[in-house]
Image (cartoon, rainbow, N blue to C red):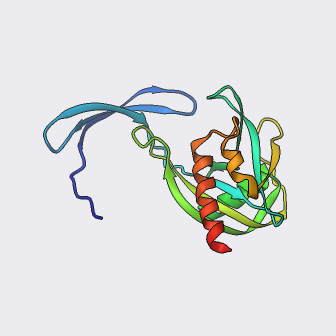
Amino acid sequence: MAFSKDKPQILAAEVVAQSRLFKIESLDLRFSNGVERTYERMQPSGRHAVLIVPVTADGDLLLIREYSAGTERYELGFPKGLIDAGESALAAANRELKEEIGFGAQRLHPLKEVILAPSYFSSRMTLFVGQDLYPERLEGDEPEPLDIVRWPLAQAEELLNHLDFAEARSISALFLALKYLACEE
């Protein structure tokens, strides 16, 4: 279904705060009906990311447990990371697998490109299923070794109830991966 509505006109854009990692931008907008509003967003960086649901030949999901400063606790989720300049999403997915869980994937199937909080962020993340895993480790940028957690694919529904498995992108990826894997059978 096609959607046709004129985007708001950007009247002004200004960086109002910044840190080592982020810039917050204020946008003065005029909507097609003449209403004007000021919105704030993270200034677009142009860098996108990947998240991979690795599935072993034995039918296990491989997850990582790593510290998340936002929640101030260790979270359980799937390997993920930024796409480097000049790197494809597919190459980034395989690199992140090697860095975070010590495996590459012979088969990487893209599931969907998602956006987290599009009112504030423009960054996109491509979700993948990784299969036909083989051992290969690359040095990553994590400050401490990541814990790798094997979870039986047959018990994926129980994973959804696990208190540490709460990140929306990992939950979305799990649902999409289960749908993809069911169609593969």
Q: Residue at x 78, y 62 (%)?
A: 104
Quadrant of the rendering where the N terminus is positioned: bottom left
* Residue 182, quarter of picture: bottom right
Q: Give residue 150's position: percent from left, percent from top.
A: 82, 51
Report if residue 158 is visible in the image.
yes
Q: Residue furthest bottom?
A: 185
Q: Residue furthest left?
A: 34
Closer to the camera in the image, 23 or 172: 172
Q: Residue at x 13, y 38 (%)?
A: 34
Quadrant of the rendering where the C terminus is positioned: bottom right
Q: Give residue 110's position: percent from left, percent from top.
A: 59, 65
Q: Is residue 72 left or right of residue 16?
A: right
Please state the total of marks drawn on the protein image.
0
Report if residue 141 is visible in the image.
no
* Residue 184, quarter of picture: bottom right
* Residue 164, quarter of picture: top right
Q: Give residue 99's position: percent from left, percent from top.
A: 77, 51
Closer to the camera in the image, 6 or 17: 6
Q: Residue at x 68, y 56 (%)?
A: 53
Q: Residue at x 77, y 53 (%)?
A: 62
Q: Is residue 112 left or right of residue 74?
A: left
Location of residue 155 with respect to 37 vertically, above or below: below
Q: Give residue 93's position: percent from left, percent from top.
A: 67, 58
Closer to the camera in the image, 59 or 98: 59
